[in-house]
Image (cartoon, rainbow, N blue to C red):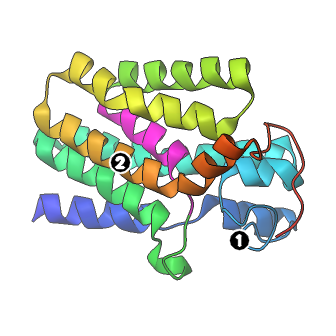
Amino acid sequence: MQAILLVVAAYLLGSVSSAVLTTRVLGLPDPRTTGSGNPGATNVLRYGGKAAAVVTLLGDGLKGYLPVLAGHWLGVAPAVLGAAGLAAFLGHLFPVFFDFKGGKGVATTLGVLLGLAWPIGVATAATWLALAVAFRYSSLAALGAVLFAPVYTAWFTREGVLVAAVGAMTLVLLWRHRANIRRLLAGEEPKIGASRPSA
């Protein structure tokens, strides 16, 4: 019962949209109808500024981190930790409170990874940062970082169930970024900090 409650709570917390709440509080346009239409930190940055993007990023990250941290505190099995992280991630992508239309899940994934073991999160974030600085594409940096996430998870935890959970998130993230991949290949993806016409 404890495991079920943790997983359900993780999904519900993941369903809380940091981007939508942040922009409402700050009086900014709804990210679902502005810019790329994605309720995430990168889209908020493009039209709402750095402060709004940072708040969104932190909120999305905490949604993934807190359920896994609670799992550690409760002493649940690694399989339950992985399920809680995956539930928070899926809640962000398919939020019950927002018509199941959520963001792409990169920040929430990072929060989950930090919760599983902080070296995994730090290594993944460092990979994102290196790629972002080198190429200036947020989506490319995210894709590169998440591809390494299962490797980092295997290295730092040696837990197959956690590697499987992170691998599942990686596959979903690649699918969620399919439009970005097409734009990258076509040379049409906007760089970090570049404005984007309203959708």
Q: Residue at x 31, y 59 (%)?
A: 87
Label 1 Cα crowd, 10 Å radius (few <14 / some 14-19 / many 20+): some
Q: Position of residue 163 (x, y in %)?
A: 21, 34
SS label for mark 2: helix
**Depth check, front residue: 24 or 136:** 136
User: In the current view of this chain or complex, which residue is farthest to the bottom?
Assistant: 99
Q: What secondary structure is the stretch in magenta mostly built from?
A: helix
Q: Residue at x 68, y 49 (%)?
A: 183
Badge 2 is on which residue?
Answer: 171
Q: Position of residue 20 (x, y in %)?
A: 69, 67
**Foreground: disc 1 or disc 2:** 2
Q: Position of residue 85 (x, y in %)?
A: 32, 49
Q: Position of residue 58 (x, y in %)?
A: 61, 43
SS label for mark 1: loop
Residue 76 in sight in this render: no
Disc ID at residue 89: none
Q: Which residues are magenta?
A: 103-116
Q: Is residue 113 magenta?
A: yes
**Depth check, front residue: 31 or 197:** 197
Question: Which amino acid does the dot numbered 2 rest on?
Answer: Leu
Q: Residue at x 83, y 41 (%)?
A: 50
**Depth check, front residue: 94 or 111:** 94
Q: Is residue 22 above or below residue 111?
A: below
Corner quadrant of residue 149: top left
Is residue 148 rendered to the left or right of residue 126?
left
User: In the current view of this chain or complex, which residue is farthest to the front?
Assistant: 186
Residue 58 in sight in this render: yes
Q: Earlier in the sequence, mark 1 or mark 2?
A: 1
Badge 1 is on which residue?
Answer: 32
Question: Which amino acid does the dot numbered 1 rest on?
Answer: Arg
